[in-house]
């Protein structure tokens, strides 16, 4: 072995070339299409004011009522002569704000206690763990309906409530993930070098559970958008005439069977398609990311 | 030379579902500044538990520790973590067994070294990086600038252990605990790492405790050796004395089971028959009795205390030290 005359530094380079990407995992085209679509929807929602769109609540009596897709109104109009495309884009704001902000709140409210609980163990962990099971056994939507009915339907209240109601599940996922790292040697090594618990959690464990945080976060966004849609469909999200995909679906559903003497399937098809495409993209992106980050110890 | 570390009658007991497990049963030792002590024993002899108990790294909920551990005269056994944190890294540091798992897989090497520098020495980014690079150089890492930005999985085992040593030494500790620092490495690298540790220990005048199962490892690199078996110190002596006046059959058995390069090829490896005793139900007599080739009736009934021999600094726990008893083939309980 020593007779080959290779110095130790060359040896290292021969064995492991850091720039060798040959067996690197790829995220794939699907992932980028999905991320692109979510990004596109976010951009539209953010810059809706700058787009040449009619006001989403403007009842334009010069426009046709319940029109199908056409040149004047790309996606047609609803029964109050409002532009569906405009309502769809402004409605995305509600879904996206509730979805992303709600998931963030859930991550903070559920995730931080989860990390501490899993790292410290002991009695606190037992209590929080039991509490999360109890809360999870309770139907979230009923809890939300009750609170929102009494407290009000402002966007921030809905976001906060959905975020908090998502936290028990976040707690379970992050706790499990933290547990698998809390006993690792590198955590003990960091401790033996004088790192505080907070430092160990933030600098040693958090980077390791980040893949879980990100992919579960994206799935939470999707789930929360569905919950908001459900609430809106029940008339418990933002007040009309402010558009949201959920209340558009609700309004459209009354026109599906000619309930008001009119029919307009487009009013259901477009918000449903928007919600479906956003959710499937979020879920696919989350799944691809999870697979991408899922590095087994063998590969390390 | 001043005494750096003093351990007195240290007991560690773990609460397990099968009852209390006495992993360390009354160990005493003392280490002077600038000296190296070897702790030798096979797996399960309590050497890792002992080193972690000295560090104060055992989980408090499950491990009960009694006795005394004094660092520089200060009692640190069962001290609160907040107090220990002032010693960890800056006064006492540890190199762990497995370099594959003791580095954080998702942080760059540089980040992991500068972390402690920033924490303890309050260095800024630039200073920390400079210090880290010089540390990497000191532990013999080629092209440290490139390695600084590498992830652990891009380095070989030997390189990773060098990085671990660099991290442990970053804040110039006065006591270095090395828990089987070469177990996961191949033989040529083992020697390099041990020589590196010895050099650094000499240059920095550190106290070092080298925990290993390999008597060969400690033979040339330590000032004193403690042989542990089943949570007990069974023999302790200055290194040279131990190899010339070996008194405990277990020490002899350990030495005989070390393969020798001078042996002809295909020599059968000598093993120690049987297994260490169950520490949740320790035997009444000498813990090594069931496996001892020299065992007598007395050994099975009474546990021998650690008694000093005629040579200063040498003591052993055996009723019939080597040379006094006859080898018996009566090895009850061993298949």
Image: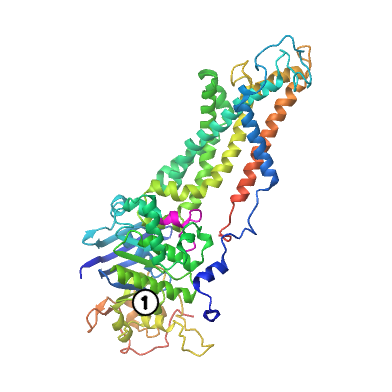
Please say if B12 is above or below B244: above
Q: Is residue B234 above or below residue B52?
A: below
- From this viewpoint, which residue is outermost toward the top? A61
Pinpoint residue B52: horizontal percent, then vertical percent: 36, 62
Image location of residue A214, percent across then percent down: 56, 42
Q: How many marks?
A: 1
Location of residue A146 in the rendering, given as x and y in whole percent from the top left corner: 54, 22
Q: Main secondary structure of the magenta part?
A: loop
Q: Nearer the viewer, residue B8 or B197?
A: B197
Residue at position x 65%, y 16% in the image? A55
Of residues A116 and A200, the one nearer the viewer is A200
Kindly identify which chain the residue marked by label 1 belongs to. Answer: B
Identify the residue under disc 1: B218
Q: Where is residue A142 drawn, in percent x and y?
A: 57, 26
For the question of whether residue B59 can be seen, the reply is no
From the viewer's perspective, is A288 left or right of B298?
A: right
Q: Which residues are magenta?
A: B97-113
Q: Crowding near pointer 1: few (<14 within 10 Å), some, many (20+)? A: many
Q: Quadrant of residue B329?
A: bottom left
Relative to residue A6, is residue A73 depicted above or below?
Answer: above
């Amino acid at each position: 072995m020593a007779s080959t005359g290779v110095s130790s530094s060359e040896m290292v380079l021969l064995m492991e070339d850091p720039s060798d990407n040959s067996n690197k995992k790829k995220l794939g085209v699907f992932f980028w299409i999905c991320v692109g679509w979510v990004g596109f929807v976010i951009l539209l929602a953010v810059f809706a004011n700058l787009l040449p769109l009619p006001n989403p609540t403007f009842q334009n009596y010069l426009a046709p009522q319940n029109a199908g897709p056409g040149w004047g109104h790309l996606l047609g109009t609803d029964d109050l002569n409002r532009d569906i495309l405009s309502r769809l884009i402004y409605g995305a704001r509600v879904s996206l704000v509730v979805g992303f902000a709600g998931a963030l709140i859930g991550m903070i409210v559920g995730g931080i206690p989860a990390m501490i609980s899993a790292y410290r163990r002991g009695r606190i962990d037992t209590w929080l763990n039991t509490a999360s099971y109890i809360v999870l056994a309770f139907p979230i939507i009923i809890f939300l309906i009750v609170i929102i009915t009494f407290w009000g339907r402002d966007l921030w209240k809905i976001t906060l409530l959905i975020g908090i109601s998502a936290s028990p599940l976040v707690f379970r996922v992050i706790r499990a993930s933290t547990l698998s790292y809390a006993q690792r040697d590198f955590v003990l090594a960091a401790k033996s070098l004088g790192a505080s618990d907070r430092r160990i959690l933030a600098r040693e464990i958090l980077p390791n559970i980040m893949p879980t945080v990100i992919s579960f976060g994206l799935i939470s966004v999707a789930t929360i958008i569905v919950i908001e849609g459900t609430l809106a469909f029940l008339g418990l999200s933002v007040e009309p005439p402010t558009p949201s995909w959920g209340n558009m679906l609700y309004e459209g559903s009354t026109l599906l069977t000619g309930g008001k003497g009119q029919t307009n399937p487009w009013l259901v098809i477009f918000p449903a398609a928007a919600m479906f495409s956003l959710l499937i993209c979020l879920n696919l992106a989350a799944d691809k990311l999870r697979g991408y980050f899922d590095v087994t110890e063998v590969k390390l | 030379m001043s005494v750096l570390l003093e351990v007195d009658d240290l007991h560690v007991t773990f609460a397990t579902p099968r009852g209390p497990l006495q992993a360390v049963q009354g160990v005493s030792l003392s280490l002077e500044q600038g000296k190296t002590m070897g702790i030798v024993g096979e797996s399960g002899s309590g050497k890792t538990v002992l080193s972690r108990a000295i560090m104060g790294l055992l989980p408090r909920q499950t491990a009960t520790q009694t006795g005394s551990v004094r660092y520089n005269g200060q009692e640190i056994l069962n001290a609160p973590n907040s107090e220990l944190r002032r010693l960890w890294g800056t006064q006492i540091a540890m190199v762990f067994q497995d370099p594959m798992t003791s580095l954080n897989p998702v942080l760059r090497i540089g980040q992991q070294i500068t972390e402690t520098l920033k924490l303890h020495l309050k260095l800024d980014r630039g200073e920390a990086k400079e210090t880290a690079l010089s540390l990497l150089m000191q532990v013999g890492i080629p092209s440290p600038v490139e390695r600084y930005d590498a992830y652990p999985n891009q380095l070989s085992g030997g390189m990773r252990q060098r990085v671990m040593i660099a991290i442990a030494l970053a804040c110039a500790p006065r006591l270095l605990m090395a828990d089987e620092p070469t177990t996961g490495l191949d033989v040529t690298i083992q020697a390099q790492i041990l020589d590196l540790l010895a050099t650094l220990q000499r240059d920095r005048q550190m106290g070092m405790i080298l925990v290993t199962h390999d008597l060969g490892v400690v033979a040339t690199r330590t000032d004193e050796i403690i042989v542990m078996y089943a949570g007990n110190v069974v023999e302790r002596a200055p290194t040279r004395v131990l190899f010339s006046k070996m008194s405990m059959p277990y020490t002899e058995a350990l030495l005989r089971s070390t393969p020798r390069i001078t042996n002809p090829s295909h020599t059968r490896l000598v093993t120690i028959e049987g297994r260490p005793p169950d520490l949740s139900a320790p035997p009444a007599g000498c813990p090594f009795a069931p496996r001892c080739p020299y065992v007598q009736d007395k050994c099975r009934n009474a546990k021998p205390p650690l008694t000093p021999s005629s040579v200063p600094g040498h003591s052993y726990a055996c009723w019939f030290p080597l040379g006094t008893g006859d080898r018996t083939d009566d090895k009850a309980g061993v298949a």
